[in-house]
Image: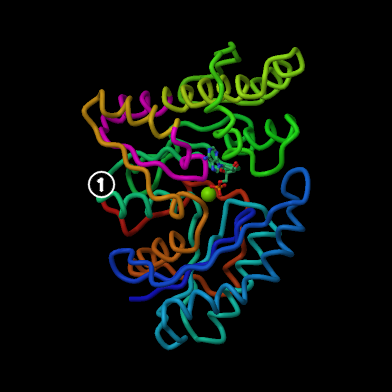
């Protein structure tokens, strides 16, 4: 079974085509990069509208398939920025109607879990999902993926991006901060905000910008922020493992590309006797292949949507989405 998947929840427009065992037959992506400041939803959506038709063609060419070789069209229904989601959903609906193929809605966060799960070979891992807009610890239980802990304010990636822009840099901030942090040596104290299994970052954002204003060099600010923020994520992941009696962790989201975060989580998990798996970069960031792969599982389990019932859900919660392809 071959499924085409469209991702457009935020800054990335991506089309992926996968077959059995999550083999990626073709993928084509393009990320919207604002000239200054953060993402403007409407401008990102315009970018997606302009580029998606060409990305569909590119992915199909790479996969050497024509429409007759596609069994279903999946799209990210939510959560995400409304205008961006609508751009991807509109293209998916049109392909579904013109090709006469079933339309399959997919939750973006569930797709991060599923691609990491199949690539890791781990049956029932816990996911630390650290991306621009989302920061969640997710585990499966009784028919749904459950959010065990999450950010109470902004996503970790948005936090890193805002900080970097505040320090004079450009979006995306995460990779640049990572490079900067490697030059840092001095650890400065910052608000460590863990509440049970939840975290918060806005206090650290204010404090880190203040550190810089009082003369702390940028590499030391970056080093202190990475150390503190990733320790917070590692702590809530460990607490979730302990409470859920799990051993294994997979990572997802753009921030999961960060070597420091990977290393800290790995150290914690291995000390508990478990395994940590981080997908390759292209499968950590938002991508159409994860939507296609999850769509394939959902479709096989009978999930489809009529065009008139396929509205996007910008605030769709991970734990409200049934996952009939998983059994307890
Ligand atoms: P996503 O929303 O999953 O596509 O991920 C995008 C976010 O990941 C942005 O906020 C980036 O700044 C962040 N990001 C990407 N690479 C890294 C990295 N190496 N370290 C930290 N954050 C990163
Ligand atoms: Mg994402």
Q: Count the labels in the image.
A: 1
* Residue closer to the observer: 234 or 174: 174
Q: Residue furthest left?
A: 273
**Pointer 1: what residue?**
122
Q: Is residue 235 left or right of residue 23?
A: right
Identify the element where label 1 is drawn: loop
Rendered position, 104 above or below 174: below
Task: Indicate the position of residue 264 as horizontal and vertical percent values.
Answer: 39, 27
Q: Residues within 10 Å of mark 1 (few under 14, many from 20)?
A: some
Residue at the image point whose x is 49% and y is 63% from the top: 288
Colouring:
rainbow
Which residues, given as a range, are shown in magenta?
Answer: 236-259
* Residue closer to the observer: 209 or 75: 209
Where's the N terminus, which quadrant? bottom left
Q: Residue furthest front?
A: 183
Task: Indicate the position of residue 327 as horizontal and vertical percent values.
Answer: 26, 52
Task: Indicate the position of residue 150 as horizontal and vertical percent values.
Answer: 51, 33
* Residue closer to the observer: 78 or 131: 131
Task: Indicate the position of residue 67 as horizontal and vertical percent values.
Answer: 47, 86
Residue at the image point whose x is 21% and y is 28% from the top: 273
Rendered position, 253 above or below 162: below
Rendered position, 120 above or below 291: above
Residue at the image point whose x is 25% and y is 24% from the top: 272
Q: Is residue 265 left or right of residue 76?
A: left
Residue at the image point whose x is 34% and y is 43% from the top: 140
């Amino acid at each position: 079974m071959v499924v085409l998947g469209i991702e457009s929840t935020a800054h990335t427009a991506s089309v992926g085509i996968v077959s059995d065992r999550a083999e990626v037959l073709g993928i084509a992506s393009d990320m919207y990069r604002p000239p200054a400041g953060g993402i403007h939803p409407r401008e990102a959506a315009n970018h997606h509208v302009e580029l998606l038709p060409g990305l569909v063609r590119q992915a199909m060419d790479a996969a050497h398939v024509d429409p007759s070789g596609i069994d279903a069209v999946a799209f990210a229904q939510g959560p995400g920025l409304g205008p961006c989601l609508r751009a991807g959903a509109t293209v998916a609906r049109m392909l579904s109607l013109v090709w006469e193929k079933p339309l399959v809605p997919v939750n973006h966060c569930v797709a991060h879990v599923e691609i990491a799960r199949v690539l890791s070979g781990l049956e029932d891992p816990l996911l630390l999902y650290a991306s621009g807009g989302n920061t969640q610890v997710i585990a499966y239980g009784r028919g749904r993926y459950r959010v065990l802990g999450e950010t109470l304010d902004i996503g970790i990636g948005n936090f890193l991006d805002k900080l970097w822009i505040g320090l004079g840099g450009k979006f995306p901030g995460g990779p640049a901060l990572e490079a900067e942090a490697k030059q840092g040596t001095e650890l400065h104290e910052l608000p460590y905000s863990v509440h049970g299994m939840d975290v918060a970052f806005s206090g650290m954002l204010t404090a880190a910008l203040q550190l810089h204003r009082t003369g702390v060099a940028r590499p030391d600010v970056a080093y202190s922020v990475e150390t503190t923020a990733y320790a917070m994520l590692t702590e809530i992941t460990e607490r979730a493992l302990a409470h859920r009696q799990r051993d294994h962790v997979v990572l997802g989201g753009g921030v999961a590309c960060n070597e420091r975060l990977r290393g800290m989580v790995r150290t914690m998990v291995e000390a508990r006797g478990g395994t940590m798996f981080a997908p390759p970069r292209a499968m950590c960031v938002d991508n159409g292949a994860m939507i296609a792969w999850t769509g394939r599982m959902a479709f096989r389990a009978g999930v489809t949507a009529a065009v008139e019932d396929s509205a996007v859900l910008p605030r769709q919660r991970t734990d409200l989405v049934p996952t009939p392809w998983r059994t307890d």
